[in-house]
Image: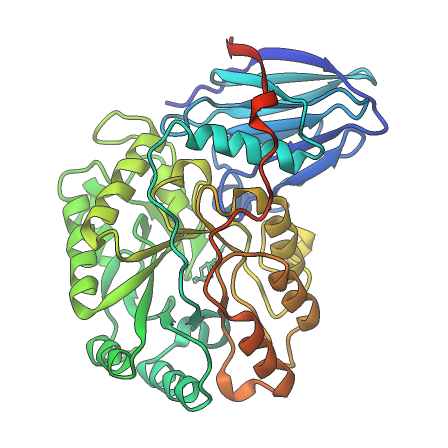
Amino acid sequence: MVSLHFDEIAEIEIDPDRALVYELGWQSWSPSGSYSFKSTSPRPLKKIWQAMAYRPEFVDPLNCFQSDGVLIVNPGDGRPIVSFGVADIQGQIPHILATPKGNKHLVISSNLPIEARSWPSAVTIEDALSGWAELILSKMELQLLKAIAPAWCSWYCYWFNVTQNDIVGALGDITRAQLPITTIQIDDGWQEAIGDWTISKRFGDLKSTIATIKEAGKESGIWLAPFLVGANSQLAEKNPSWILGGADAGFNWNQPLLALDTTANGAMDYLLETFTMLKELGVTYFKLDFLYAGAMEGNRNRDIPSEVAYRQAMASIRECVGDEATIVGCGAPILSSVGLVDAMRISPDISPLWDPPEQDLSQPGSRAAILNSRARRALHGRFWVNDPDCLLLRPSIENRELIADAVASTNGLRTFSDPISSLDEWAIAKVRELITPAETAPAVPSPRVASVQYISQQVQ
Ligand code: 9PG
């Protein structure tokens, strides 16, 4: 079980008017950013968002800053930026707090061992985060990043109601308009139920849909939430021993959500059969969503840390679909996914609306999506290709120009998700301009690693 006991690691002096603290949110949708010493950082405004968009196990008070895996402080007084981070992201990910003490100090505490490092050549927190990411990578053997081809996604126009006809219709429109799209990604809606990964009658014939996509010379992508189980699913009824004990994964699709215990006998076999079926149908691109459910704390059949169970399950999925397939992580624990996905959603959902509900920055809204994508720019080209979520370009989208500008300034995955018939001339021109293969070079250059000063090893 994860330790809820926090040890003090360091106390550092800061300039209260200039100091900044960087938080790296636990999963794709968790808010990330730099906050001034005198401000507070985001917290879930509804209880359910704690489980579905923040780190379920840690409900932090408002009077501290909180981060997962690494927390970075710019003291603001000219002294170097300091990172407090885990040495190896393949094990348990520490929860790290920075609590103001008086008006000139921050106390750093963590529930697991972390290292403190100073970054004298880093001008900004983003530079230090780039350097820290490279340090983590230097301890792992990763494959080269893929320049993932551009995709169209069904979610932000057909939502849960997507059908075979919508997909084949979009394919025809894309081909006729000669839009630069390689992959047609079928999102949520093709499956029988969450946990029951068979094809729903409502959707139509997935096999022939994928065959039609192939005949048009395009690739097929599909959405799946492998570690999530709807309480009303057949899986929950027939295989209660596969449910992760004590884990509440939230509520959606009109039902409570449970998590799959990937260490239960038969559970991974079932998932791998699903992936094999999809691969045999011709799917080459997998958007794996709600992945946080695979890394939640709970009673597992095998007593291993939740992050380790998650990495093992993701590694088996990768082995099953093959290195040539594209895996896009979504709703996924950030650091525990390094090396296991080709692209990673680093923001909450984009939306036809600019502001997220109740201004909670973990929730769908283009403003929230853009903010988080900026705060995680340094991860792109290092851990994976960043996915800032789909472009939405139709005239009814609030602030569509701002969304286009934001995507134009990132080098991540380029996807879009409008009904083709809804696009005006401006939108079509933006698709042609922006929907290009993902660049794999880092968006933020490295700080001079040679000047890293190691200030303490495994403090604690
Ligand atoms: C499909 C969608 C899209 C989208 C994903 C993800 O908290 N919630 O209930 C919640 C619902 C949907 C959601 C995120 C949170 O979006 O990011 O791109 O694939 O699932 O259901």
The correct choice, above or below, for 295 with respect to 393 in the image is: above
Q: In this view, does 323 lie to the left or right of 392?
A: left
Q: Is residue 338 left or right of residue 262?
A: right
The correct choice, above or below, for 390 with respect to 427 in the image is: above
Quarter that holds the N terminus: top left
What residue do we see at 40% from left, 26% from top? 92
What residue do we see at 26% from left, 41% from top? 315
| The quadrant where residue 403 appears | bottom right
What residue do we see at 60% from left, 28% from top? 71
| The quadrant where residue 160 appears | bottom left
Q: Is residue 337 left or right of residue 429?
A: left
The number of numbered discs placed on residues in the rendered structure image is 0
The correct choice, above or below, for 102 with respect to 419 in the image is: above
Q: In the image as oriented, which residue stretches furthest toward the bottom?
A: 176
Which color mode does the image show? Answer: rainbow
Please provide percent x and percent y for residue 352. 61, 70
* Residue 151 at least partly seen: yes
What residue do we see at 21% from left, 31% from top? 301
Nearer the observer, 184 or 262: 184
Nearer the observer, 114 or 47: 114
* Residue 60 at least partly seen: no
Please provide percent x and percent y for residue 283. 25, 66
Please provide percent x and percent y for residue 426. 64, 83
Q: In this view, does 132 lie to the left or right of 344?
A: right
